[in-house]
Amino acid sequence: MAFEGSTYDEEYLLADVELDWQRSPECVYVWMHPDGQFGVFPLPNNKWRLMVIAPATGGKEPSRASVELFQRLMQKCTGDSTTTISNPTWMSNFRISRRMVKVYRVQWVFLMGDAAHAHSPFGGQGMNTGIQDAFNLAWKLALVIQGKALDALLDTYQEERLPIARKVLAETDQHTKLFFARNPLLHFLCDRIVIPLLKQPFVQRRMLWEASELGINYRTSTLSQSYRGTSQQKFGMRKWQRRAAWPGDRAPDGHCVRLPSQEATSLFQEFRGTTSHLLMFDGLIHTEANYAQFAQIARRVKEMLGNEIKISLVASQDKPVAKMDWDGALLLDPEHVLHTRYGAGSPSLYFVRPDGYIGFCCQPARLEPLLQYLEGVFVLQLPISTEPSAIHS
């Protein structure tokens, strides 16, 4: 499997060290210099990562990384002649490659992480991208190996993750060329345009969000589907859904209360583990008929998937559900935070995958569309019934 791409011409120096300065460990520091940039990145335990382009040697072998070399380059590029570099954990000369494979799967061989993509360390994207590769593949592989899903589910690993790696490579390539190149024009653009922009809080918030990779979505995936009925206008769904999560988005978190114990919890606490989740929102509509239908949906899904799914009813009030025939998880959303974040203005169903992404949304809540979706993901234990079971709106 070809690892296609290229390697940058520049050689870089990298080191993890201690610095006896008083700068905040909450910030990243980069100095722009005609001979190359000097970057300092905070690490835990009073350590700092130094990254700089190796000095030009006129065609000779570049100098090897050393404390003395970093000390000299720090003074030259930053003008700081008082900070002392000491206690290196490790130091290295390296060159950056920008490469990736064209496919993530060949029969029963799967690639992920650094085996599938290599790129500049600028922005710290490599670790998060690899971890997300692993989790995306792991839950699908586990279901197929256990005979609980069809082999076709594994094809969605490449479908979802390869475009993400391609985007990360493109962005880190642009950033690396802009910040670490010796081109005079690029230096001018950095000094006059990029650096002033980077000082703006809204730009820094955007960069932090991009670096966290929490905004990655699989909205175009075949596993991301929705069913929306005709009651949206009646309950003002457009207003509720304006900023709500969609299938393919990372499921939002939010505080709630576990009933009947009245214990404070959150959705992410409820999501712990490796199972899928079905969230059933009452949508601010409190009728016995609706809750009876929710109980029927829960029993039906549990019969088919067993321990592969955890079902939670997210209620906006506690009194209407007090007498409900329900033995699953019951979560109270008294301030409607979760209902708002999920756009659940009417009774709704949300299927959340083991990796924390929304796979399916059903509004208003109906059993049949949900079962049709689950049939495309799992090998169900019982045949699908076609009996109507619409939630009353």
Image (cartoon, helix red, strand yellow):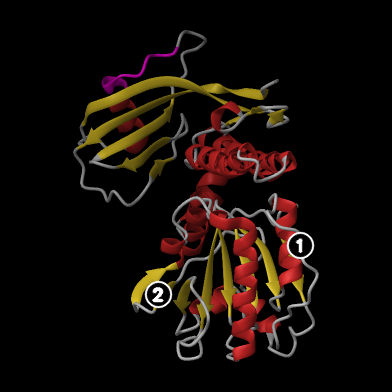
The image position of residue 209, as x and y in percent, is 51, 56
Identify the residue at image location x=26%, y=26%: 88
Asked if residue 213 is among those painted magenta in the image, a careful observer would answer: no
**Dot 1 alpha-carbon crowd within 10 angstroms: few under 14, some 14 to 19, many 20 or more:** some
Which residue is identified by label 1?
384
Asked if residue 65 is among those painted magenta in the image, a careful observer would answer: yes
Describe the element under mark 1 as helix, strand or loop.
loop
Q: Which quadrant of the view contains residue 389? A: bottom right
289 left or right of 318 in image: right
Q: Amino acid at mark 1?
A: Ile
In the depicted structure, whether residue 188 falls above or below residue 105: below
Which residue is identified by label 2?
258
Earlier residue among tags 1 and 2: 2
Q: Amino acid at mark 2?
A: Arg
In the depicted structure, whether residue 129 falls above or below residue 65: below
Magenta stretch mostly in which secondary structure? loop
